[in-house]
Amino acid sequence: MVDPAGPRKKFSLGSPFSLATPAERCFSTSVKAWHYLDKQNQDKQVREDELSSLANSGEIGRESLVWTAGQDNWQTASAVLPELFSDNVADGMAPPALPQSLVVGPVPGQLCHEVDYEIFGDDMQIVEIELDPSETVIAEAGAMNYMEEDISFEAKMGDGSEADSGIMGKLLSVGKRALTGESIFMTHFTHGGGSGKRRVAFASPYPGKIIPLNMAEIGGQILCQKDAFLCAAKGTKVSIAFNKKLGVGFFGGEGFILQKLEGDGMAFIHAGGTVIRKDLKGETLRVDTGCLVGFSPGVTYDIERAGNLKSMFFGGEGLFLATLKGHGTVYLQSLPFSRMADRIIAHAPKSGGSAKGEGSVLGGIGRLLDGD
């Protein structure tokens, strides 16, 4: 049977113009024409000055096949057009450093100072904050480990996020901090020099991990356990939130008061043991009470019974479990500080605990000789 449309054209990678009409071949006389195969291996023809935008959008990838006049065959884009995928500037050189006298301001619309950081250590960590001139980081009293020259510090009532709050606003903020058991003062560290970058470091108060939080990425707010906050870029609001459910307050492991951080910059919290991040997408997570570090907006916090009566009393997991449900981010810790302190006290002989660790009959004699 004869095809009424005439004989079908055969497509060959060796002849890129096999699908093009005479009009398409006359694409432009002044701008070089290129052919590429899209994700469905369809032949597309474009001007050379359109290649960059197609590469940026992902339409043309490193392994996409391309052809232009002068090539014997189709080749990958990365082989014949490497400049489309280069991370360098057009002339292949990086721009010079900014003048030292230049003070870089915050991103327009951003409330918090923009700080860089680096975390050192494993189980007893330090976070080192890098400040540009006039930048400030706030921290809990006593958290500072070291600081370089040109950095000055000042103890203030409040976090500085509401500079015009007045004396009553500051007193209210201080009262809220007192409820969490923290110092009524926060320390503000500012780079007062005229040029260069300076660093100030803050140490974790007990074995565990420091968690860097980009507040803009988690909805601008997080609720965490009372003593979790370590430091943050100036502009971060540190306040409290109340558990409105009696059951959660009594048995949830976090009490009735939670610490609330709000902002759009970097904040750093601390937790005990190993820290795990869980991203919830509508599912429910059940957690041992006390192991919850913090959770973002969109996650609801409640409690439920830990199984039947036998499981509740003899299962070793306590009477209740914390439940987290919704859409958001949850941070968990493997060893809450209160639990670690209880175990240390339980095995401290001078506190009435049973000694452990010597592992031999000579253990008691050794302690007598040491004066223990």
Image (cartoon, grey):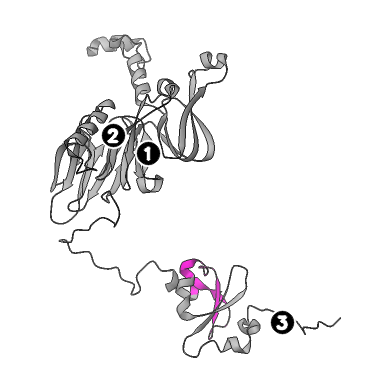
Which residue occupies 22% across, 58% down?
A: 104
Q: Nearer the viewer, residue 78 or 228?
A: 228
> Is 211 or 267 nearer to us in this picture?
267
Q: Residue at x 50, y 38 (%)?
A: 326
**Label 2, on which residue?**
204
Inter-mark Cα distance, 2 to 3? 71 Å
Image-based side of 165 in relation to 15, left or right: left
Q: Is residue 150 left or right of residue 328?
A: left
Question: Between tags 1 and 2, which lies in front?
Answer: 1
Residue type at mark 2? Answer: Ser
Dot 3 surroundings within 10 Å: few (below 14), some, or many (20 or more)? few
Answer whether labels 3 and 1 touch (C-beta < 8 Å).
no
Image quarter (top left, top right, bottom left or bottom right) of the N terminus: bottom right
User: Which kind of residue does numbered mark 1 sit on?
Assistant: Ile
Q: Position of residue 233 (x, y in %)?
A: 26, 45
Cα separation between marks 1 and 2: 19 Å
**Most extreme residue toward the right, as rendered?**
1
Please tell me whether residue 23 belongs to the stretch shown in magenta.
no
Question: Residue sitting at 49 percent across and 85 percent down?
Answer: 32
Q: Quadrant of residue 12?
A: bottom right
- Residue 149 percent across, percent down from the top left: 13, 47
Per the image, the residue denoted by label 1 is 222
Assess disc 2: are there few (<14), some (14-19) or many (≥20) residues with their C-alpha within 10 Å of its C-alpha: many
Residue holding disc 3: 9
Looking at the rendered image, the disc whose residue lies closer to the viewer, 3 or 1, is 1
Could you say which quadrant of the image residue 310 lies in? top right
Indicate which disc, 3 or 1, sits on the residue closer to the N terminus: 3
Name the residue located 23 percent from the left edge and 41 percent from the top edge: 138
Magenta region, residue range: 55-79
User: Where 142 falls versus 304 (above or below)?
Assistant: below
Residue 310 vertical placement versus 223 (above, below): above
Q: Quadrant of residue 330?
A: top left
